[in-house]
Amino acid sequence: MPAIVMEVKTAERHPNASALHVYGMEAPGFERLQIIANAEELYAVGDRVAVALVDSILKDGTKIKPTKLRGLLSYGLALEQVTQPVGHDLSATYCQQSVATIVSLQKWPSIELLSNVRRSLNLLGIAPKVTYRAKVKLDGTNAGVQICSDGRVAAQSRTQVITPKNDNMGFAHWVSQNLECFTQMVGNEHITLFGEWCGKGIQKRTSISQIDRKIFVLFAMQLGGVEGIPSRLIVDPDEIAQRVPQHPDIFVLPFWGEPIVLDFGHPEQVAAAIARINQVVASIEQTDPWVQDTFGKAGLGEGLVLYVEALEPDTLPLAFSDLMFKAKGEKHQVVKTRQPVQIDPEVAKNIDEFVQLFITPARLEQGLSVACNGQLDMQQMGAFLKWLVTDVQKESAAELEASQLTWKAVNKAVMNAGRSWYREQVEFQSFS
């Protein structure tokens, strides 16, 4: 509920307390409210007063509830006399704002392995020259903030719009506590900030979990994407930093290392570049350089994401996001590849090998986090299996083709492997 300008219709001294006054206040669309206030600021009939209604939360955290004062109920809090017209909403001035819920999810593109990118290029019969810039991949949970042109702010996970009551690792609650930071970005365009919600209590494996708080680390920004307006993805760290207000818990992830060129028409050049990327990923898995430089914490890193910086030819029947790819270290691989980055897909000799290839601990743990918010519960197993099957099917086209298998042939085996793992985790939890 908001804070509203109301008109004083009646003003009387409290019958049981000389230091209190009882007011009857009205505004269009509201029944007359009884408001009790102390005598420090007296109001007269006809005055316009800012009133915080029941269930509103003031910026200092005060929650407004019906309150009995010396035998009479007060249904709101008189804040001060104002000059705005009766009925004017003053929530932005006095109250904590809540995150919006009625917005469409703005999806972060699915980032594939390089072998899948190459397969797509081969199917189209094209071999572009692509210049990439790398960013360190942080181990957390995918998160986003939408800033609508009408001033609304919404929080989202990878799969849905979230609120403090239906949250993902506390991210929506954090956004609701920092709305003023995001409303500074309101303009003519719809903005979506994509990032990783990471740090203390989010994950346990990597060095970013050693820091003393949770942080929102931005890796991309989208402009548009709603009401038929085409979207434009921004990944340049400097451009993102120029648009985002400074905040102690918001970071913009920088590019890491020098540009990397993959000329898909020249296999030897691609092979040499891949070898260099794999060396970098191996180094990052030993120590995440961004976390060490930013927070002084040394430890396990996850890998890299390669973003498109330039393209020759500059017009292709693919979006830049279709050309991006990820390169994870061995401990974070969702596909058991021989190298973090390789141009050719792995070949499974049979269905069992295919399952071993794709049903990895990293993928299973990711599914638990994304589909079940990290909570093991048999009632959530259906959601977990749905996510797992969808994720494997989406990422396995190149491997299925190379292995001469079909999704129909492996679907049941993938689901059974996921079901067995989930049940084992639930049983282990019940005994621990």
Image (spheres, rainbow, N blue to C red):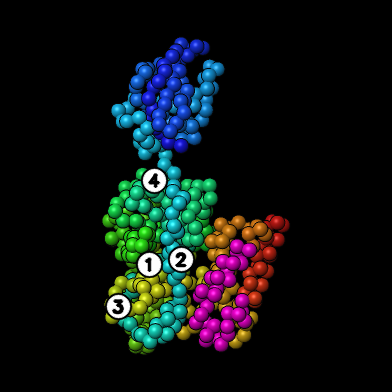
Quick check: 16 left or right of 315? right
Task: Identify which residue, 120 or 294, lies in the foreground.
Answer: 120
Quick check: 356 left or right of 105? right
* Crowding at mark 2 (Cα within 10 Å: few <14, some 14-19, many 20+): many
Main SS class of the magenta portion in the image: helix
Give the residue type at disc 4: Leu
Alpha-carbon span between mark 1 and mark 4: 27 Å
Give the residue type at disc 3: Thr
Q: Is residue 57 above or below residue 211?
A: above
* Crowding at mark 1 (Cα within 10 Å: few <14, some 14-19, many 20+): many
Question: Counting residues from the N terminus, which is met first, the one under dot 2 or under dot 4?
Answer: 4
Alpha-carbon span between mark 4 and mark 3: 39 Å
Identify the residue position indicated by label 1 in the image: 135
Numbered circle sitting on residue 315: 3
Q: Secondary structure at mark 2?
A: loop
Give the residue type at disc 1: Lys
Q: Which residues are magenta?
A: 382-411
Identify the residue position indicated by label 4 in the image: 179
Give the residue type at disc 2: Gly
Task: Give the residue at x 43% y 54%.
Answer: 103
Image spot of residue 335 (x, y percent): 53, 75
Image spot of residue 90 (x, y percent): 36, 35
Question: Counting residues from the N terminus, which is met first, the one under dot 4 or under dot 3?
Answer: 4
Question: Counting residues from the N terminus, which is met first, the one under dot 1 or under dot 2?
Answer: 1
Task: Give the residue at x 34% y 88%.
Answer: 266
- Whether the residues at callouts 2 and 3 have beta carbons within 8 Å, the answer is no
